[in-house]
Image (cartoon, rainbow, N blue to C red):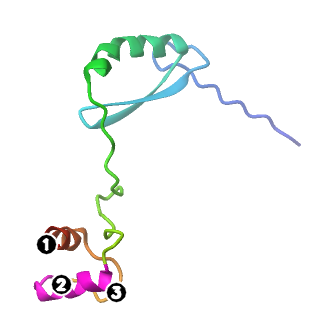
Amino acid sequence: MSRNVSVVVTDDLDGSTDARTVSFGLDGVAYEIDLSEQNRERLGGALAPFIHAARRVQRASRSRNGSRRPAPGADRAAVRAWAKEAGLQVSERGRISSEVMRQYEARH
């Protein structure tokens, strides 16, 4: 037996069909809303003067928990040796904490 499943995305404001998801952010908070073409144009028109006057920024390349990977040229063994000399706690193997990496990068 076969089934056909249809997903109908409706406008979150007026319930009309053929809506698409729109993403935007304000004050560091990301939002999504499903809008029809007409309401996407309304949103774009309302934001246009602000977008025109604003600066575009790139998102930071950090993972979700805010940790950083060692710099591409950083030798993990050198980081561990430096951390031990500096009296910082660092494991013999595995992940190097973001705080240790931050301090290492600040010193080198």
Give whichever of 50, 95 is nearer the camera: 50
Residue at numbered disc 2: 82
Q: CA distance from mark 3 to mark 2?
A: 15 Å
* SS state under label 1: helix
Magenta stretch: includes residue 62: no
Q: Measured from the top left, where is residue 29 in percent x and y?
A: 29, 36
Most extreme residue toward the right is: 1
Residue at left offset 28%, top offset 76%: 96
Taking 100 as reference, is 21 above or below it?
A: above
Taking 15 as reference, is 21 above or below it?
A: below
Q: CA distance from mark 1 to mark 2?
A: 10 Å
Foreground mark, 3 or 2?
A: 2
Residue 1 in which image quadrant: top right
Q: Measured from the top left, where is residue 12 in percent x and y?
A: 47, 20
Q: Measured from the top left, where is residue 13 in percent x and y?
A: 45, 16
The amino acid pointed to by label 1 is Arg
Over which residues does the magenta segment extend? Answer: 75-88
Q: Is residue 36 left or right of residue 54?
A: right
* Rendered image: mark on residue 61: none
Residue at numbered disc 3: 93
The amino acid pointed to by label 2 is Trp
Label 1 packing within 10 angstroms: few (<14), some (14-19), many (20+): few
Which callout, 3 or 1, points at the residue further toward the start of the chain? 3
Residue at numbered disc 1: 107
* SS state under label 3: loop
Q: In the rendered view of the protein, which quadrant contains the C terminus?
A: bottom left
Taking 100 as reference, is 5 above or below it?
A: above
Give whichever of 85, 90 is nearer the camera: 85
* SS state under label 2: helix
Q: CA distance from mark 3 to mark 1?
A: 22 Å
Contact check, label 1 and label 2, Cβ < 8 Å: yes
